[in-house]
Amino acid sequence: MEKLAPAKDRLVKSKQNWVDGELRGKILVLLCAVIMITATISITIFLGTKGLQSFIKNGVSLIEFITSTKWNPTNQANPEYGVLPFIFGSFAVTFLAAIIAAPLGIGGAIFMTEIAPSWGRKILQPVIELLVGIPSVVYGFIGLTVLVPFIREHVGGLGFSLLSGMIVLSIMILPTITTIATDAISSLPKSLREGSYALGATRWQTIRKVLIPAALPSLLTAIVLGMARAFGEALAVQMVIGNVRNLPTSILDASATLTTIITLNMGHTTYGSVENNTLWSMGLILLVMSFAFILLIRYLSSRRKL
Amino acid sequence: MSNITLTRQVFDINNLNLWYGDHHALKDINFPINKKEVTAIIGPSGCGKSTFIKTLNLMINMVPNVKMTGEINFNGQNILSDKLDLVELRKNVGMVFQKGNPFPQSIYDNVAYGPRIHGMKRKVHLDEVVTKSLMDVALWDEVKDRLHTPALGLSGGQQQRLCIARALATKPDVLLMDEPTSALDPISTLKIEELILELKEKYTIVIVTHNMQQASRVSDKTAFFLMGELIELDSTSTIFSNPADERTEGYITGRFG
């Protein structure tokens, strides 16, 4: 039998064990964290410096950049750098997509958690996972082949429009909203439902007056996360929105968003040119907006009551 | 004589059997519950006492795969019949749970919840019900200046009394309490027990409890359940001093359970 060291010695921390196990593991996970943080900070700094160059080095006016509706960077004599139409386009498709996807997603979530928890979930869950798995280029392709001609023939306009962009985006962000809303509602304690039913409330009253208000901060988080995704989506939107530089006047007008203008123009502008730099500035606006979305989500989560 | 007994009964349960799937959880229960009395239900864990109290407002229907036979007559109406209006039953048979479960809303909205879902809209009426219910549970003085603050800001004992007020707001005849003090400290427990003694002037109360001193302090009748059977139902003093069944005596004196 192995001889045990006296209790007094065993109580002294063994340096060897510390180095062998604890320290090695600690360094490993610290490294992972450092890499992630460095990547984020570098991207932010790079985008910050590149994005500000058009204003500092090329002398583009910031005010003109975000308030002018005239985008004509290739005009040699008098180039114009107004990106308001694209900022507007980005916000318009994002909000419109959220208006469609939020009720659908939250409705689906309520169906899965409260109305038909067994079979509803069995069918809807895989459907949603499938929606997540479809690549955005496929969404765009379907939109281009089916949706655009349909809108052209049955609704009006060119077909390439805010409306097409909003429909494609709303389907793309539906899984995000549904998944988070489902988690939010199903994580509400059972005692809330019991309390409501025991007072004679019907299922619908319980959903409407207890469960939805209790889950509201999380439901808003779900919507904001969906909007953040919509705001940053480029490829699928670009394929159906038409990409014109004018401010749209109706939902059937073709339009453009910050992301679509960047993807369209990054290939054929020279690195370091004014036009290329303004694309970076648009990227910076996207980054600032995504920070704003994150702050909003943080704020909403801090208001969660349960 | 028997006529008088009949009219005093709020609940009359005959040959109630209940199965969870294959598990026979309640066996041939015959149980009259009298008006304006406190009936305590005691018994070891898993004896069916919580199951039993949940049949009285049919909260048991929330559990999947439950099957029941027999009769539960509430004011002369068998609540196990298909014609039952569940909303009306639960309006008349309020329930308080193990742990206070206020909604994450204001104190006022919690109490007004029941009356609102049953169609009360006028603010004057709601104000009146909220005030009265909170006074009934002796919470009014503690919360009258912060009726519109979140109910979850109250202490555990206050939350439980708020839940009692919420149940009283629908003006029930019967109040079911499923181990209402099991999550509370001794002082809050004492307050709830005092409250039960006051409430029995107006309401019929059925209380499930693990705490035998509590049963003896607050109840008029005590029922002892064991393995899904109602072993003994008698006045509390008889059960605790001179029980008829030796299993009751064994449980009360702490030989098992």
Image: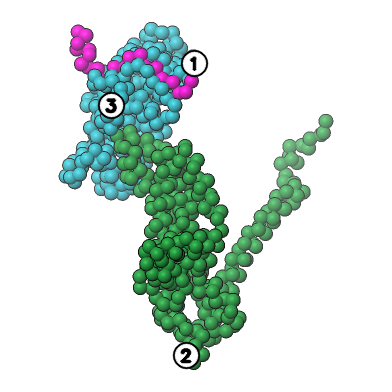
Q: Colour of chain A?
A: green
Q: Quadrant of the N terminus of chain B?
A: top left
Query: Tag on residue B256?
Result: 1
Compared with A114, A57 (above or below) is below
x, y percent for residue A168: 46, 60
Q: Nearer the viewer, residue B247 or A135?
A: A135
Query: Is residue B145 rendered to the left or right of residue A45?
Result: left
CA–CA distance between discs 2 and 1?
Answer: 95 Å
Residue B138 visible to an observer of this rendering: no
Magenta region: which residues? B1-22
Which chain does the numbered disc 3 sit on?
B
Crowd rating for badge 3 (residues with CA inside 10 Å; few <14, some 14–19, many 20+) = few
Give me the chain that's cyan: B
Compared with A133, B73 (above or below) is above
Task: Check disc 2 and report the residue beneath it.
Answer: A78
Query: Is residue A229 rendered to the left or right of residue A41?
Result: left
Please, what is the three-letter code of the amino acid marked with disc 3?
Leu
Residue A185 falls in image quadrant: top left
**Is the residue at mark 2 from the same chain as the one at mark 1?**
no
Q: Could you tell me which secondary element the residue under label 3 belongs to?
A: loop
Q: Is residue A280 magenta?
A: no
Q: Nearer the viewer, residue A84 or B16?
A: A84
